[in-house]
């Protein structure tokens, strides 16, 4: 019999029209949750996510919702529509993110603000809306031990410096401290907040690396486990973090990186 640990729960996944976000949305639906698929500009990708869910799962309900998470009014509208449709939200997966890379001395204010606005301020808007909804309603003990769950999709670069990507690394470092501060403050309300910090995961964004054998060989030098991750591995971890099996976990960053954060340069004594 198929296990549905998130049955009768509703999950909003930002930036779920492709890549990691899409895999998380599919995994949440497989686990029994209703899913709000958020996209910024890729409506076709959002529809593709919905189609993949329908092929894999017949019980979950789906809502596709456009929103730019860096805009407060878009986020408020998205949450209002999701709550109108499903009654409440139980899980937020804050996945939407962007990169705009440049050497720091050449970085424009637009590049800086774009990354911070989406990756950090957008996460603030979404998490605030989620926590307000969790606090509005009573606990639902027949559905979940927690009042609500928030999962930030971070990066190994919340702890690994990344020259040429200072805006991105700063946004992810800020994300880690925001998550921990909120976990500290809202634990008494039975609201759990955690992060998943992926390393090198096979997505279309880095396809030029993992399809090129030389580039891939260089990348694997940074990964002790000597392979790239798959998006499904992030999805499965997100489901577990949203389930009662991880109820005692809050304020944690879970690195899915094949050991990238284990300082592989020191293999053989450095």
Image (tube, rainbow, N blue to C red):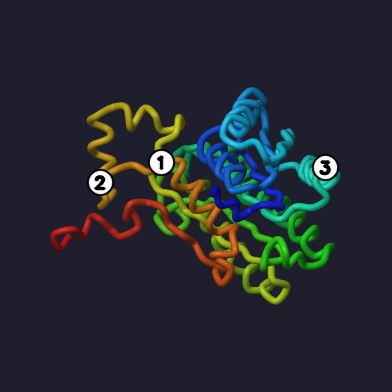
Judged left or right of residue 270, residue 256 is right
Which residue is at 46% across, 41% downward?
231
Which residue is at 63% across, 73% downward?
184
Q: Earlier in the sequence, mark 2 or mark 3?
A: 3
Q: Of the residues tagged 3 and 1, which is closer to the observer?
A: 3
Q: Earlier in the sequence, mark 3 or mark 1?
A: 3
Judged left or right of residue 147, residue 136 is right
Q: Residues within 10 Å of mark 3 (few under 14, many from 20)?
A: some
- Secondary structure, mark 2, is loop
Q: Which residue is mark 3?
A: 85
Query: Residue farthest to the left?
Result: 268
For residue 171, say whether it is visible.
no
The label on residue 226 is: 2
Q: Residue 63: percent from the left, percent from the top?
A: 74, 36
Of 98 and 128, nearer the camera is 128
The CA distance from mark 1 to mark 2 is: 13 Å
Q: Is residue 177 above or below residue 80?
A: below
Q: Residue 101: percent from the left, percent from the top?
A: 48, 38
Q: Of the residues tagged 2 and 3, which is closer to the observer?
A: 3
- Secondary structure, mark 3, is helix
The CA distance from mark 2 to mark 3 is: 44 Å
Q: Which residue is mark 1?
A: 230
Query: Residue farthest to the front?
Result: 1
Judged left or right of residue 258, residue 97 is right
For residue 113, say whether it is visible.
yes
Q: Is residue 172 above or below residue 25?
A: below
Q: Of the residues tagged 1 and 2, which is closer to the observer?
A: 1
């Amino acid at each position: 019999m198929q296990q549905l640990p998130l049955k009768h729960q509703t999950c909003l996944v930002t930036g779920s029209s492709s890549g990691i976000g899409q895999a998380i949305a599919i995994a949440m639906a497989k686990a029994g949750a209703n899913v709000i698929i958020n996209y910024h500009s890729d409506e076709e990708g959002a529809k593709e996510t919905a189609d993949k869910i329908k092929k894999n799962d017949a019980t979950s309900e789906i809502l596709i919702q456009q929103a730019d998470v860096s805009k407060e009014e878009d986020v408020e509208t998205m949450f209002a529509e999701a709550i109108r449709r499903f009654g409440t939200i139980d899980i937020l997966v804050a996945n939407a993110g962007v990169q705009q890379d440049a050497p720091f001395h050449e970085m424009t204010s637009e590049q800086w603000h774009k990354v911070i606005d989406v990756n950090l301020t957008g996460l603030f808007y979404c998490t605030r809306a989620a926590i307000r909804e969790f606090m509005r309603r009573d606990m639902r003990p027949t559905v979940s031990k927690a009042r609500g769950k928030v999962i930030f999709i971070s990066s190994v670069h919340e702890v690994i410096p990344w020259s040429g990507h200072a805006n991105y690394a700063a946004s992810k470092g800020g994300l880690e401290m925001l998550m921990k501060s909120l976990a500290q403050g809202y634990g008494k309300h039975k609201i759990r907040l955690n992060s998943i910090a992926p390393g090198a995961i096979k997505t279309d964004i880095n396809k030029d690396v993992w399809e090129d054998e030389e580039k891939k060989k260089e990348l694997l030098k940074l990964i002790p486990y000597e392979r790239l991750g798959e998006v499904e591995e992030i999805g499965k971890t997100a489901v577990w973090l949203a389930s009662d099996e991880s109820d005692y976990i809050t304020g944690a960053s879970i690195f899915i990186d094949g050991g990238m954060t284990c300082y592989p340069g020191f293999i053989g004594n450095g």
